[in-house]
Image (cartoon, helix red, strand yellow):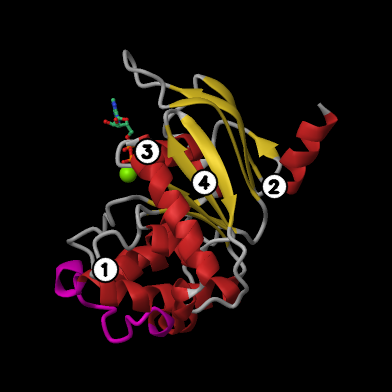
Amino acid sequence: MRGAIGLFSSSMLAINELTYAFQGTAPIFENINLRVAPGEFVSVIGPSGSGKSTLFKLITGLLAPDKGEIGINGEISGERLGKVGYMPQKDLLLPWRTVLDNVMLPLEVEGKKGNLAEIHEWFSRFGLKGYENAFPDELSGGMRQRAAFLRTIMTGKELLLLDEPFGALDAMTKRNMHTWLLGLWEDLQKTVLFITHDLEEAILLSDRIYLLGDAHVREWKVNLPRPRNSDQIYQPEFIELRKELERLIHHEN
Ligand code: ADP
Ligand code: MG
């Protein structure tokens, strides 16, 4: 037991022996364990329907586990949505609000004003300068994703749960977003749990990768030096890991 308690207290996120099934269906998770250390970048991959988004709903407490425990920052409790910055799979920007009002939403919910000069700096940082008063449908796909992401950052939480944030972007835009995100993550020192179905993205960005499938998880460490850059995708270690994961994902299918 001592070991388990130790792990809880040193982890930003700790999932212990989690089991979950939607009513009347086979379990999505059976006794899975997962850990994220402070400052880590960890990806969750797996075939479509393997339970990636469900995992996030369990972490945030939107769904309750059938069995097992979930701890955030050493604390086990049912109310977790307020402890994480959660970016759901759909960007869910409110179409009737300006980009600025969308981004300010987390502050508004907490009854905070926010420092406007600081917020304008964030807009520059996120490539959204000049679009404060635009509406979401006036933005490109990449900009909408960055706006939704900025809103997630505005929660001020250390642990960010990002569900396929770049899933809908074309390859070029995605590549630019990777470089941008790596820079941001290194600066802000956030802890990130990142869902993607793109293996290249998972390897390039992550310290570790969890593969979901058959109600279980497997874990890989990504042994590539940081700071990362997109040229690393041609390195033998990169290609080897990619092949291995590809083979496993197809096998799980
Ligand atoms: P992923 O994000 O990996 O594509 P999901 O977590 O969305 O997968 O879904 C995992 C499985 O759970 C799928 O088979 C999906 O159909 C099922 N599922 C998701 N939400 C519900 C729900 N509310 N009720 C019943 N089954 C669901
Ligand atoms: Mg999903």
For discs 2 and 3, the disc positioned in front in the rendered view: 3
Tag 1: amino acid: Arg
Q: Is-magenta flag for residue 131?
A: yes
Q: Label 3 near label 1: C-beta < 8 Å? A: no
Foreground pick, 164 / 125:
164
Q: Which residue is mark 3?
A: 251
Please state, as top left, top right, bottom left or bottom right, where the N terminus lies in the image: top right
Q: Which image quarter has ligand 2?
A: top left
Q: Gap in Å between the C-alphas at discs 4 and 3?
A: 16 Å
| Observer-nearest of 215 and 146 | 215
Residue drawn at x 67%, y 56% is 38
What's the residue type where badge 3 is placed? Answer: His
How far apart are the two marked residues, 2 and 3, measured between alpha carbons? 31 Å
- Which residue carries the number 4 mark? 210
Q: Are marks 4 and 1 in contact (CB under 8 Å)?
A: no
* In the depicted structure, whether residue 145 falls above or below residue 216: below
